[in-house]
Amino acid sequence: MRLGIISALHEEQQGLVEAMQRPYKLIHGMREYVVGHLWEIDAVCVLSRIGKVAAAMTATTLVEKFGVTHILFTGVAGAGDAAIRVGDVVVAESLVQHDMDATPLFPRYEVPLTGLTHFLSDRRMAVHLLEAAQRFLAHDFAAAIEAQERAAFALQQPRVHRGLVASADEFVKGRERVRALHAALPGLLAVEMEGAAVAQVCFELGIPFGVIRTISDNANENAATDFMRFVKSVAARYAFHIVRQFCLGWRDGLPAAGAAPAQASRDSAGT
Ligand code: ADE
């Protein structure tokens, strides 16, 4: 396995590059790719920057130039469901491009000529990510996130969810907008700006991938402020510990292949 790890922003990947063993850096296409080992996993870390094209280009380069066999996207997202709170973690089971609209030529949300609206993430990676997030919250969370920050963001008992993540070249920042998206996309849990682009690239190249997102805001009128604060002071801690737990679990072969994820709530949309 060679694992490509993508985040959009520096703050979402901080700490991981420092943790890499025997790192070396390569610049390609205005991005810095750091190749090395993370908890004995052969890995390549890179920042995609924001948006679907940026993410697609980065994912493609990871596969074609760096020979990664798996891709993990880790970062933050806005809540796509009223029951999901800032500090919760969402593992994508499927991803949709919510700005894709080639109607009337193709059905709404369908990526033309793929026949697909929803792209499925790799089941094994998703199970490992769920387990990793659960272990982070159970064992590392209290020490990793200072009490002051837990209080500032009202991070009481963060939960892990799995389900639908929607991506677009749009920062969602309105109550009505997020409600409309939730109504149009049943089971929607989170909104962000890269995951479904990576999903399409991985689908087309036959690469297993996973997407994990920490909720930074409620995609409402306060989204931009909440996002900035969360990204600055909390997001990196989540990403570092979840990726660490993921690598350790993957290396040790935990959980057993096909095992049901422990205590992870399904999507919290009441299903
Ligand atoms: N990433 C984090 N918050 C987001 C939001 N509200 N919309 C889109 N992407 C996001």
Image: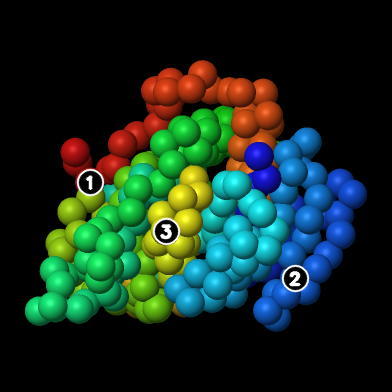
**Marks 3/2: CA distance?**
24 Å
In terms of secondary structure, where does tag 1 sit?
A: loop
Does residue 201 appear in the picture of this structure? yes
The numbered dot on residue 269 is 1
Disc 2 is placed on an element classified as strand
Q: Earlier in the sequence, mark 3 or mark 1?
A: 3
Vertical comparison of 64 with 85: above or below: below
Which mark is nearer the camera, 3 or 1?
A: 3
Which image quadrant for residue 52? bottom left
The tally of labels here is 3
Inter-mark Cα distance, 1 to 2: 39 Å
- Image coordinates of residue 89 in percent, x first then y, are 46, 47
Give the label on residue 253, or none: none
State the quadrant of the C terminus. top left
Place of residue 269 in the rendered image (x, y in percent of width and height, measured from the top left): 22, 46
The residue located at (62%, 62%) in the rendering is 64
Amino acid type of the residue tagged 3 in the rendering: Glu
Mark 2 surroundings within 10 Å by alpha-carbon count, few (fewer than 14), some (14 through 19), many (20 or more): some
Spatial CA distance of label 3 from label 1 is: 30 Å
State if disc 1 and disc 3 touch (CB < 8 Å): no
Residue denoted by label 2? 32
| Residue bearing mark 3 | 204
Query: In the figure, is residue 129 to the left or right of 263?
Result: right
Q: Nearer the viewer, residue 116 or 142?
A: 116
From the top left corner, tell me how far across and down residue 246 is, in percent. Answer: 61, 37
48 or 245: nearer the eye?
48
The nearer-to-camera label among 1 and 2 is: 2
**Residue occupying the point 52% across, 33% down:** 128
- Frontmost residue, 36 versus 76: 36
Q: Are marks 3 and 2 in contact (CB under 8 Å)?
A: no
Please report whichever mark, 1 or 2, sits nearer to the chain's N-terminal start: 2
